[in-house]
Image (cartoon, grey):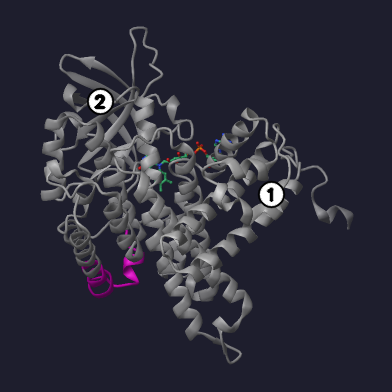
């Protein structure tokens, strides 16, 4: 691990290079429209060895220090969210798990390629019929002599058709041809003819134009030492991997939200309506204060991730906090971009404008690594189970005892002093999950304040979180019982009464 001044100068050099590339070398309008990352840009970025941040020192890397990894992602996403995600994929979804679970000889070769020859890696989990339900994946493998033969179909893996290496997931085929419940991970080297994953159909992804996505045919043979070695089961390896990856969201979110905030402040100071700058209007102030609250929250999540998410820690049991990182930050990223577009007005709706692009670029963060609807539900389940265990169904009383919320409980006391029913339906659990997300966010924000962070930003953020929490409480109490009427056509045309 590097010392503070070395880290600072590494990040400063990276920042300076990106400022140069994105403001002087790339046309700001065209960069928002181009599909695929321009090769010169990728090379110049990778020449600074940002991926070395995710690689342990014994393999020539900078030590996989989460502070540095998060800072790289933050710096990149201020300039380009797609670039930051690309580095996030190669780091969190490839290098970090390989560093933790790969064989020594394999790691030495692959990490050297990533750092010295600008190679990239990605992760393939999702299949056309198995997304949310990833554990049901049908890609399977069997041992054939000294290789594993892996077959299946994967789609939506970031860097499809582009990555030099993959971590491929598959289930072992048993003698009766059924599949093992556990999932295994394999390194796959695209430069080997026996390990070619074929991108059969490229997708026209709505945003994130730098990153290719596709449907991929997998029919590969990988050497036996390419199988990752879980400490116990492959499913636990996957949980450790995904929870750490969710704790890389703060870096991507922080730079992105800071950019939305800076653009919004600059625009609202300069744009005059009826002789007054936009900043003079109360609703504009509300939006700017919210943007600053999301910025403060992302800083708080970054601090938390830096403290707990190093590869030396096993995160398979940290699902709850990892889920709060993922959901809250992705919601805040989307809200930040929506607010910027509103404040910019029609100009923001141009496809080549940063505001419009940012909406489509940040939207999938709410879907990949688990749809937020599903994860908010899981967050609520985790708390409700805990409440049932100690037979304490009053939300405030329970929040006071939970390690992730105890410090913030007083802030929300007025709103959350009510009983939770064990058979709360799913839509209310989703709202409850988000409410709990705000309370955890408030606790992390208080902890950020204790470390010396700007007190005014902290206080403003807490006031925004309280307002959001209050409206969620309302929604939990009032959520409708309406269901979809599939046969909705009879008597559903208003013209019939004329
Ligand atoms: C831009 C982008 C990048 C991605 N990158 C990668 C990658 O690098 N590697 C990789 O392997 N995959 C990747 N994915 C795939 C991603 O992880 C999946 O899309 C995601 O897990 C959801 O799966 P699905 O699309 O099949 O949706 P589905 O599983 O069909 O779910 C669709 C929707 O159904 C609803 N739903 C599902 N289950 C429930 C439930 N239990 N309760 C209530 N509602 C429910 C939710 O609204 C959900 O959003 C990426 C996807 C995108 C869009």
Q: Quadrant of the C terminus?
A: bottom right
- State the residue in front, 311 or 478: 311
**Place of residue 101 in the rendered image (x, y in percent of width and height, measured from the top left):** 25, 31
Residue 83: quarter of image: bottom left
Q: In what element is the residue under mark 1? A: helix
Residue 416, numbered circle: 1
Whole-percent x, y for residue 350 in the image: 46, 70
Secondary structure mostly taken by the magenta-highlighted segment of the chain: helix
- The stretch drawn in magenta includes residue 26: yes
Residue 382, how many percent across, how many down? 56, 35
- Pick the front one: 196 or 487: 196
The span picked out in magenta is: 17-35
Q: Is residue 437 visible?
A: no
In the rendered structure, the answer to whether residue 221 lies left or right of residue 372 reads left
Categorize mark 2 by other alpha carbons within 10 Å: few (<14), some (14-19), many (20+).
some
Q: Measure the alpha-carbon separation of dots 2 and 1.
A: 45 Å
Residue at x 19%, y 37% (from the top left corner): 190
2 or 1: mark nearer the eye = 1
When asked about the image quadrant of residue 201, the answer is: top left
State yes or no: residue 178 in magenta: no
In terms of sequence position, does the residue under pointer 2 or pointer 1 come before the other?
2
Q: Which mark is residue 425?
A: none
- Which SS class for mark 2? loop
Q: Which mark is residue 229?
A: 2
């Amino acid at each position: 691990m590097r010392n503070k001044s070395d880290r600072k100068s590494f990040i400063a050099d990276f920042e300076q290079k990106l400022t140069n590339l994105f403001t002087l070398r790339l046309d700001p309008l065209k960069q928002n429209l181009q599909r695929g990352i321009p090769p010169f840009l990728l090379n110049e970025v990778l020449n600074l060895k940002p991926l070395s941040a995710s690689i342990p020192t014994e393999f020539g890397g900078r030590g996989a220090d989460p502070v540095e990894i998060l800072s790289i992602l933050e710096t990149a996403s201020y300039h380009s969210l797609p670039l930051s995600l690309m580095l996030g994929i190669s780091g969190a979804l490839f290098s970090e798990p390989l560093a933790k679970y790969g064989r020594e000889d394999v790691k030495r070769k692959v990490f050297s390629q990533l750092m010295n020859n600008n190679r990239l890696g990605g992760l393939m989990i999702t299949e056309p019929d198995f997304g949310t339900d990833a554990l049901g994946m049908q890609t399977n493998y069997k041992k054939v002599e000294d290789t594993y033969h892996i077959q299946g179909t994967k789609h939506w893996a970031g860097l499809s058709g582009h990555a030099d290496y993959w971590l491929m997931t598959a289930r072992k085929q048993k003698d009766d041809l059924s599949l093992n419940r556990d999932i295994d991970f394999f390194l796959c080297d695209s430069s080997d003819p026996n390990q070619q994953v074929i991108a059969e159909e490229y997708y026209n992804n709505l945003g994130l134009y730098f990153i290719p996505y596709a449907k991929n045919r997998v029919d590969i043979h990988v050497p036996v030492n390419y199988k990752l070695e879980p400490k116990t089961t492959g499913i636990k390896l996957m949980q450790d991997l995904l929870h750490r990856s969710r704790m890389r969201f703060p870096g991507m979110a922080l730079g992105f939200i800071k950019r939305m905030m800076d653009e919004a402040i600059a625009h609202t100071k300069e744009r005059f309506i009826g002789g007054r700058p936009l900043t003079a209007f109360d609703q504009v102030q509300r939006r700017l204060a919210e943007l600053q609250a999301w910025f403060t929250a992302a800083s708080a999540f970054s601090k938390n991730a830096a403290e707990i998410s190093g590869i030396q820690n096993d995160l398979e049991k940290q699902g709850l906090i990892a889920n709060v990182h993922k959901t809250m930050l992705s919601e805040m990223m989307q809200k930040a971009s929506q607010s910027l577009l509103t404040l910019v007005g029609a100009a923001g709706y141009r496809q080549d404008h940063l505001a419009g692009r940012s909406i489509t670029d940040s939207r999938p963060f709410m879907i990949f690594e688990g749809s937020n609807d599903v994860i908010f539900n899981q967050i609520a389940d985790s708390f409700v189970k805990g409440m049932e265990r100690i037979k304490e169904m009053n939300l405030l009383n329970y929040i006071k005892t939970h390690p992730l919320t105890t410090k913030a409980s007083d802030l929300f006391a007025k709103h959350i002093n009510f009983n939770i029913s064990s058979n709360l339906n799913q839509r209310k659990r989703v709202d409850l999950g988000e409410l709990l997300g705000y309370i955890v966010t408030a606790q992390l924000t208080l902890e950020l304040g204790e470390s010396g962070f700007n007190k005014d930003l902290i206080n403003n953020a807490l006031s925004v979180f309280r307002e959001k929490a209050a409206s969620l409480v309302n929604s939990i109490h009032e959520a409708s019982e309406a269901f979809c009427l599939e046969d909705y056509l009879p008597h559903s045309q208003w013209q019939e009464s004329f």
